[in-house]
Image (spheres, helix red, strand yellow):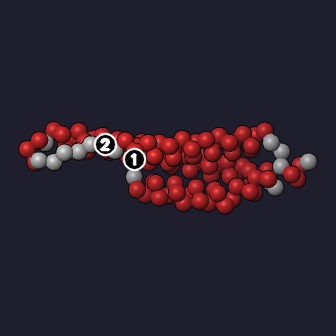
Amino acid sequence: MFGLFLSGTGLSGLLLVSSPIVLYSRWGSISVMIMSLVTALVVIAAASLSTAISYMFEMIVKTQADIGVQASVGKWMLGFEWAAAALTLLACIIHVCVGWRCRSRRDT
């Protein structure tokens, strides 16, 4: 889970740096589009895995009442995870739209 979030962060940083290529090359647009799709899939997988692990851990701790430990799932944590997943999906949709519908500066 942490590895997926870390690789999603690294891919997002790489995507941030390589996004201006879209303006100058159609092949660059395709590569950035694929990279944004991979980034979105990695972050969504990490958020899904993190949500499942959090709720399973909460359920397991609540069933073991004799150990004296309480657990609850952090709503802020889940909110930020899924907001990151939604924003990377939005970036992917934007890059797909730019790759399909827009012409580069070289084509004009």
- In 3D space, how far apart are the residues under numbered discs 1 and 2 (Cα atoms)? 8 Å
Disc 1 marks a residue whose amino acid type is Met
Disc 2 marks a residue whose amino acid type is Val
Q: Residue furthest left?
A: 66
Q: Is residue 94 above or below residue 3?
A: above
Residue 73: which numbered mark, if any?
A: 2
> Percent from the top left, x then y, of residue 85?
51, 44
10 Å crowding of disc 1: few (<14), some (14-19), many (20+):
few
> Percent from the top left, x then y, of residue 54?
31, 44
Quadrant for residue 16, please give it.
bottom right
- The residue at the point 83 percent across, 45 percent down is 103
- Going by the image, does 42 lie left or right of 67? right
- Going by the image, does 99 lie left or right of 37? right
Quadrant for residue 18, please give it.
bottom right
Q: Which residue is mark 1?
A: 77
- The residue at the point 86 percent across, 51 percent down is 105
Q: Is residue 62 above or below residue 107?
A: above
Q: Is residue 45 visible?
A: no
- The residue at the point 62 percent across, 60 percent down is 14
- The residue at the point 76 percent across, 52 percent down is 22
> Percent from the top left, x then y, of residue 19?
70, 55
* Mark 1 touches mark 2? (CB < 8 Å): yes
Residue 31: which numbered mark, if any?
A: none
Indicate the secondary structure of the residue bearing disc 1.
helix
- Going by the image, does 104 lie left or right of 40? right
Q: Is residue 71 visible?
A: yes
Indicate the secondary structure of the residue bearing disc 2.
loop
